[in-house]
Image (tube, grey):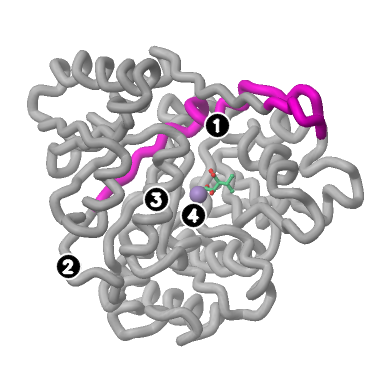
């Protein structure tokens, strides 16, 4: 029997609740489809920061490298650790260190889920650049606290980085409805975004079967609300992709349904799977967090591991459950009820 070694980082808040739920479903899927998930839970979170002075141990990245995949719940407990400290100590360095340059986020309505829009016929795959751009971390501050204080944060766009994310997007489009929308702001940002547009045009020649649209981020925000059914694969920079995928989450019924995968496409290091939502301290530990985003992220993990039949079965089980009206609105069902229902549907 195939065994996969998974590093679990439940993290903070509802990250703990939903990781437990998702893993129960993943392990059940393994039992049914003949693979074993060997999990090691790593206690890296904001409480760990208080105990040790760091979000993860110094050898954390080296340690994670040995796993087949990483599953992360959520990171952040802003009441006690500033977000910029907790995220730069755990989530963001993992994405960069393991070259998880493609952050994939599917946006569509699951069966039975009502979104806020009048249309329900959309199926968007957002591909967010995940290692550079506005998140490169290039910058600094001088004259702290003084009148002449200066803060600079420079976006970094490399040809290698832009090319690889666009190629990934083109390939995803080829496997879907063959339309790619590249999102920039090249009417205002005349260096990095004009460069991105140029690279998109250059590469388009290699993918003649894919039609390409160029959109500015502001117009794209409107389009995702007014006509999301016209979109297929959407590729955007790190920050633009971050913002658009919360919008995507909203139109698919909320963050409780938004899954994501941080993929290293060349498989030179583990990929990481996590729901888009955060740690939601206000509802942590109350058994009311929606585990569906986390379970769907687990589905993306199974796909990445090559367990496609299991992945399909879990997503079908999730939609059987939401199709019955379970877990379709915040507070309607408990975390436990939704998880148990998905596991039962998986048995059928
Ligand atoms: C996300 C999150 C993170 C991001 C935060 C927590 C740093 O919002 O995964 O979308 O901005 O990438
Ligand atoms: Mn985000």
Tell me which residue sits at (40%, 38%) in the image: 128
Q: Quadrant of the C terminus?
A: bottom left
Q: Residue furthest right?
A: 51
Residue identifier under label 3: 245
What separation in Å lies between label 2 and label 1 (alpha carbons)? Answer: 33 Å
Tell me which residue sits at (29%, 68%) in the image: 110
Marking on residue 135:
1
Question: Quick one: 300 or 151, which is closer to the camera?
Answer: 151
Residue identifier under label 2: 119
**What crowding class fits label 3: few (fewer than 14 Cα within 10 Å), some (14-19), or many (20 or more)?**
many
**What crowding class fits label 4: few (fewer than 14 Cα within 10 Å), some (14-19), or many (20 or more)?**
many
Q: Specify which label sits upstream in the sequence, 2 or 3.
A: 2
Q: Is mark 1 within 8 Å of ligand 1?
A: yes
What separation in Å lies between label 2 and label 3 (alpha carbons)? Answer: 18 Å
Q: Are marks 2 and 1 in contact (CB under 8 Å)?
A: no
Magenta stretch: give its range. 124-150
Q: Is mark 4 within 8 Å of ligand 1?
A: yes
202 magenta-colored: no
Q: Position of residue 164 (x, y in %)?
A: 36, 21
Q: Is mark 3 within 8 Å of ligand 1?
A: yes
Q: Specify which label sits upstream in the sequence, 3 or 4.
A: 3
Q: Specify which label sits upstream in the sequence, 2 or 1.
A: 2
Q: Are marks 3 and 4 in contact (CB under 8 Å)?
A: yes
129 magenta-colored: yes
**What crowding class fits label 1: few (fewer than 14 Cα within 10 Å), some (14-19), or many (20 or more)?**
some
Q: Residue furthest front?
A: 147
């Amino acid at each position: 029997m195939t065994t996969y070694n998974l590093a679990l980082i439940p993290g903070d808040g509802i990250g703990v609740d939903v990781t437990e739920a998702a893993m129960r479903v993943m392990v059940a899927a393994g039992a049914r489809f003949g693979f074993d998930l060997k999990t090691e839970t790593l206690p890296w979170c904001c409480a760990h920061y208080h105990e040790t002075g760091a979000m993860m141990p110094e050898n954390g990245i080296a340690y994670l490298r040995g796993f087949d995949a990483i599953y992360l719940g959520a990171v952040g407990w802003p009441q006690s650790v500033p977000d910029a400290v907790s995220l730069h100590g755990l989530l963001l360095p993992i994405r960069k260190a393991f070259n998880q340059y493609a952050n994939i986020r599917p946006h569509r309505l699951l069966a039975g889920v009502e979104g806020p829009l009048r249309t329900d016929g959309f199926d968007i795959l957002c591909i967010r650049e995940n290692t550079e751009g506005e998140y490169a971390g290039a910058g600094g501050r001088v004259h702290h606290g003084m009148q002449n204080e200066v803060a600079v944060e420079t976006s970094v766009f490399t040809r290698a980085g832009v090319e690889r994310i666009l190629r990934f997007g083109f390939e995803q489009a080829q496997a879907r409805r063959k339309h790619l929308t590249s999102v920039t702001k090249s009417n205002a940002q005349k260096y990095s975004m004009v460069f991105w547009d140029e690279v998109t045009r250059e590469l388009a020649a290699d993918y003649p079967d894919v039609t390409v649209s160029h959109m500015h981020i502001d117009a794209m925000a409107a389009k995702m609300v007014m006509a999301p059914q016209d979109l297929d694969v959407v590729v955007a920079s790190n920050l633009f992709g971050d913002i658009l995928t919360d919008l995507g989450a909203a139109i698919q019924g909320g963050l409780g349904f938004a899954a994501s995968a941080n993929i290293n496409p060349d498989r030179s290091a583990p990929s990481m799977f996590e729901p888009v939502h955060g740690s939601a301290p206000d509802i942590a530990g109350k058994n009311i967090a929606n585990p569906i985003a986390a379970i769907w992220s687990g589905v993306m993990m199974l796909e990445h591991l090559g367990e496609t039949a299991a992945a399909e079965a879990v997503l079908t089980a999730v939609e059987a459950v939401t199709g019955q009206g379970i877990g379709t609105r915040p507070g309607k069902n408990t975390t436990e009820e939704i998880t148990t229902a998905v596991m039962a549907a998986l048995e059928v």
